[in-house]
Amino acid sequence: MEHFAGESIFRLGILNVTNTLLNTLLTDLIIFSLVFFIAKNLKSLPNLFQSGVELIVEWFYSLTETISEKNTGKIFPYFMTFFIFILIANWTGILPGVGSIGFFEDDRLIPLFRGATTDLNTTLALALISAVATHTMSIRTIGIKDYLSRYFSFNPINLFIGALEIISEITKIISLSFRLFGNIFAGEMVLITVAGIFAFLFPIPFLLLEIIVGLVQALVFSMLTMVFMAVLSTPHGEHAKEVSH
């Protein structure tokens, strides 16, 4: 696994099916299965599993509420969706066989499955979705006039600040995608290297570390998205007052 993009497994017409795409589909299958299982087993008197899920969701909702306040209902679904998808995508990348079972091509192993977030295309797509969702929500919440006033003004100083804001939005996309990609890609490369040298026991601490890294990176991406949404969903003048206070 030495490329930033996923390796091709087969083609369906014009669609190039890569090993990271297969892992994305596996992630989707796991999420849909969990949703179906939880929805089917909901009880008015919750069992231990349901209580645990409700406790986690409630904690995340409270966390969103402390930051976004009145826009919590709009932001929370995005926050949880990004967190769950990225967390499971990160963790499926370290399942036994992922990255190690495949076929050889030009004396190089092409794994059938490879962690979705070890593909820069996937993390860049997630960052772009985050940016589009954030700006769409901002326009719907505060209106197009207030939204544009963040970036454009007849005042030269405010116009310069607006230009910096536009550059900042672009760097957010780059930062979100490369942070997630870099941490997961590097971690899995370390795991593959260590497992290739020491087959038993020694890789376990690295595996546990990658589980924690996968959780942390999912939290970082989703929480940054939540903060960006909260900031851009606040009227420009109101946000300026909050900053001055």
Image (cartoon, rainbow, N blue to C red):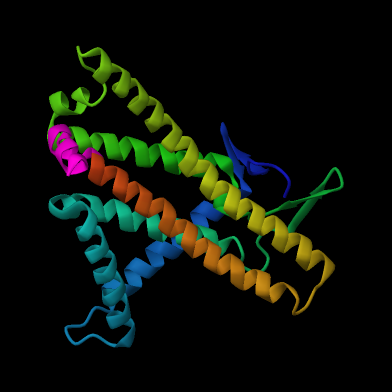
Which residue is at the front of the view, 100 or 196?
Answer: 196
Residue located 30% across and 39% down the image:
133
Which residue is at the front of the view, 162 or 24?
Answer: 162
Q: Quadrant of residue 184?
A: bottom right
Classify residue 233 as left or right of residue 93: left
Q: Is residue 71 visible?
A: yes
Task: Reply yes or no: does residue 229 show up in magenta.
Answer: no
Q: Tell me the magenta residue range.
A: 232-245
Q: Position of residue 100 (x, y in %)?
A: 73, 61
Classify residue 102 as left or right of residue 48: right
Residue located 19% across and 87% down the image:
45
Quarter that holds the C terminus: top left
Q: Quadrant of residue 149?
A: top left
Q: Position of residue 6 (x, y in %)?
A: 63, 44
Q: What is the magenta segment's predominant secondary structure?
A: helix
Residue located 29% across and 65% down the image:
60
Q: How many marks?
A: 0
Q: Position of residue 235 (x, y in %)?
A: 14, 36
Residue located 62% across and 49% down the image:
19
